[in-house]
Image (cartoon, rainbow, N blue to C red):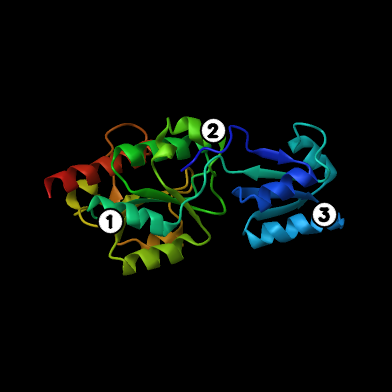
Amino acid sequence: MEIKSEESRIEGRNAVLEAFRAGRPIDKLFVLDGCQDGSVRSIVREAKKHDTILNFVTKDRLDALSETGRHQGVIAFAAVFEYAEVSDILNKARERGEAPFVFILDGIEDPHNLGAIIRTANLAGAHGVIIPKHRSALLTATVMRASAGALNYTPVAKVTNIVQIMKELKKAGLWFVCGDMGGQSMYSLNLTGPIGLVIGNEGEGVSRLVREECDMIASIPMKGDIDSLNASVAAGVLAYEIVRQRMNA
């Protein structure tokens, strides 16, 4: 994936419209509520065409988001990197002659955690990462820095419905394991073969519908006085149990 810019904020009607028309990946668009100017309507049409998250907000909200003070009623947030397709991730596994190994992130909202998990995914040999369009950190400059360069090599796909994608990947032969304190010890599970590792939200864990789609629930043995790990640390522990088993298979 190609780096686009260190800056992800785009302000002003012409700049935002040109960004859409140039094919830049726009994650979120903030528009002044009630504005009906022709150029703003064109921007909103582009946002809907590209499945961009669209927010109609007050002028005070736009002023608070603005870095230039010249937003003209529209501010867009562009991804620093191009998003991949889920098919790109599967193709990467095929090109390597390996069983697919995919990270599915169910609501990781901290950009530092997202970057750290992408870094772990790369080092663990995963073929890519899948994140949801909503309720997730997106590919900002902060994520890029936290990934320590892994975004250059690890495809990240953004999807509308995680559960639907899991169903489709099951048809491609993948099994899914998620981390949860109520599961079986990760050491007792067979984590070899085509696999998707599901990591849940920092506070709430894996959502109910996503958990129901998982084939295995893995717990990490805990010996200390607290009962949970940071999401990115948990991802690393589970990922390297998968690595160990794949190496010994």
State yes or no: discs 1 and 3 in contact (Cβ < 8 Å).
no
Residue 200 percent across, percent down from the top left: 43, 49
Q: Which residue is mark 3?
A: 39
**First in residue order: circle 1 vs circle 3:** 3
- Check disc 2 and give the amino acid type: Thr
- Check disc 1 and give the amino acid type: Arg
Relative to 231, is 176 above or below? below
Label 2 SS: helix
Residue 2 percent across, percent down from the top left: 49, 41
Spatial CA span between label 1 and label 3: 44 Å
Q: Is residue 95 visible?
A: yes
**First in residue order: circle 1 vs circle 2:** 1
Decide which of 119, 49 is in the foreground and name it. Answer: 49
Q: Which residue is mark 1?
A: 94
At 20% from the left and 53% from the top, the residue drawn is 192
**First in residue order: circle 3 vs circle 2:** 3
